[in-house]
C-alpha cells in the first residue's frame, strides 16, 4: 500500500499556487490576519522607517491584500501582484484604493507594474517557486521593478520549518478543514494537503487542494540575489527578529538593489560577517527589540 505520508511523486505543477484559487477564501479567513501581525512587525523593524512618506512599495505574491491595505494605511503607495486571480479579487475588496495585478513573480514587467522604492514578499511566498532557477527569475524580475538602492524584504521557510509543518484541523459555523503537511528531503519539497468544506447556503462545498513549497539553501539564495543585482544586506531568524528565542524555522532576508552586482558581491563576500550566518549580520535594524548578535 502506498505510504500516505509520502510526498506525491507526480510531476510538480507548473505554478504551485494554482491551488490557491479554491484555497483563497480559507487563506483569508484563517491565515491572513495572523500573518499580518508579524509581517508588519518585521517590516517596521527592517524598512518602514527608511521609506519616504508616499514611497512606492510592491507587495510580491500579495495574497488577499491584507498587507497591501495595512501599508497603504501607513501612507505608502502600494501595488500588489499575485498569480491567483481569486487572491487578487480579495485584494481589490480589502484595499479598494490600491493597485493590483494578476501576475507571475517570475515575469513581472516594470512597464506594467511600475517602479518601486521597496518590494516585500512575505509569508514564505517565494518558497512556492519550484527551483533555484525560478527563484533567480523572480529576483531578476523584482530587481527590474526597483529603483536604484531599492529594498527587498522576504521570508522563507527553512528545512527545519518545512519539516516542522504540523497537521491541523478546524471547524466552525462557516467552514471545516484538515491540513496534512509532508516534507521530502530528497526532493526538498514540502506539500500542504488541504481538504475543506465551506458553507454554501444550505449545503457544504468541498475544496481539495495541494500547495507545494521548496526548501532553498542559504548559499543558493545568496548566489541568486547577487547574480540578479542585489546586495544581500542581512538575514534573521524570524522569531529572534521579533524578540523571541530563535527557532530556525523561518528566515527573513533584507537585500538592496545595487548597480554593479559583481563588485558588491565581491566586497560582501570579503566582509567579516557572511550573509549565511544565522543571526543578524551586516546591519542593525531600527532598534526597538534588540537582536542578539
Ligand atoms: C502563503 S501566501 C502569502 C500571501 C501574502 N504574501 C501574505 O503575506 O499573506 C502565498 C501567495 O503566493 C502566491 N504565489 C505563489 N506562486 C506565485 C507566483 N509564481 N507568482 C505570483 N504569486 C505567487 C499565491 O497565489 C499566494 O497568494
Image: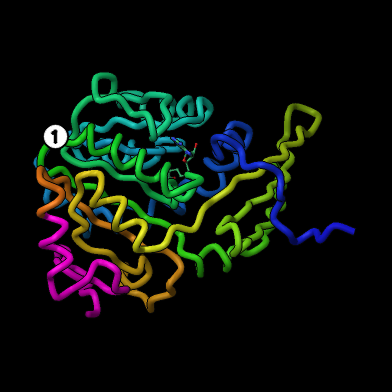
**Whether residue 25 can be seen here:** no
- Residue 185, how many percent across, how many down? 59, 64
- Residue 85, how many percent across, how many down? 50, 25
In percent of the image, x 30 and y 45: which residue is there? 120
Q: Residue 78, relative to residue 158: is it above or below?
A: above
Left or right, residue 218 beside residue 210: left
Q: Nearer the viewer, residue 131 or 68?
A: 131
Tell me the SS state at disc 1: loop
Which residue does the numbered mark 1 point to in the structure image?
54
Snapshot quadrant of residue 148: top left
In percent of the image, x 27 and y 36: which residue is there? 58
Q: Nearer the viewer, residue 216 or 199?
A: 216
Left or right, residue 120 beside residue 28: left
Prevailing secondary structure class for the magenta stretch in the rendered image: loop
- Image quarter in which the N terminus is found: bottom right
Residue that protrudes farthest toward the top in the picture? 112
Report the magenta residues as a range.
Answer: 264-293
- Residue 181 on the magenta span: no
- Residue 46, how many percent across, how many down? 21, 57
Q: Residue 85, relative to residue 256: is it above or below?
A: above
In percent of the image, x 46 and y 60: which residue is there? 157
Instruction: Sort mark 1 into few (<14), some (14-19) or many (20+) by Cα contacts within 10 Å.
Output: few
Mark 1 CB lies closer than 8 A to ligand 1: no
Amino acid at each position: 500500500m502506498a505510504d500516505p505520508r509520502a510526498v506525491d511523486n507526480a510531476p510538480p505543477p507548473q505554478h504551485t499556487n494554482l491551488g490557491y484559487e479554491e484555497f483563497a477564501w480559507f487563506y483569508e479567513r484563517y491565515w491572513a490576519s495572523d500573518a499580518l501581525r508579524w509581517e508588519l512587525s518585521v517590516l517596521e523593524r527592517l524598512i518602514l522607517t527608511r521609506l519616504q512618506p508616499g514611497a512606492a512599495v510592491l507587495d510580491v505574491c500579495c495574497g488577499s491584500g491584507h498587507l497591501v491595505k495595512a501599508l497603504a494605511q501607513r501612507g505608502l503607495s502600494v501595488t500588489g501582484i499575485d498569480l491567483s486571480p481569486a487572491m487578487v479579487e480579495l485584494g481589490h475588496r480589502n484595499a479598494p484604493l490600491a493597485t493590483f495585478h494578476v501576475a507571475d513573480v517570475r515575469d513581472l514587467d516594470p512597464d506594467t507594474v511600475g517602479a518601486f522604492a521597496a518590494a516585500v514578499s512575505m509569508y514564505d511566498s517565494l518558497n512556492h517557486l519550484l527551483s533555484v532557477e525560478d527563484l533567480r527569475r523572480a529576483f531578476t524580475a523584482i530587481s527590474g521593478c526597483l529603483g536604484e538602492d531599492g529594498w527587498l524584504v522576504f521570508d522563507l521557510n527553512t528545512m527545519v520549518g518545512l519539516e516542522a509543518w504540523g497537521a491541523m484541523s478546524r471547524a466552525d459555523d462557516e467552514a471545516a478543514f484538515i491540513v496534512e503537511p509532508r516534507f521530502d528531503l530528497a526532493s526538498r519539497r514540502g506539500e500542504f494537503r488541504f481538504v475543506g468544506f465551506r458553507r454554501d447556503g444550505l449545503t457544504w462545498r468541498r475544496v481539495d487542494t495541494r500547495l507545494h513549497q521548496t526548501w532553498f539553501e542559504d548559499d543558493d539564495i545568496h548566489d541568486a540575489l547577487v547574480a540578479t543585482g542585489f546586495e544581500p544586506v542581512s538575514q534573521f531568524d524570524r522569531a529572534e527578529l521579533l524578540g523571541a528565542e530563535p527557532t530556525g524555522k523561518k528566515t527573513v532576508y533584507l537585500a538592496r538593489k545595487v548597480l554593479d552586482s559583481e563588485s558588491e558581491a565581491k566586497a560582501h563576500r570579503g566582509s567579516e560577517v557572511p550573509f549565511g550566518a544565522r543571526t543578524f549580520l551586516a546591519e542593525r535594524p531600527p532598534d526597538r527589540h534588540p537582536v542578539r548578535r
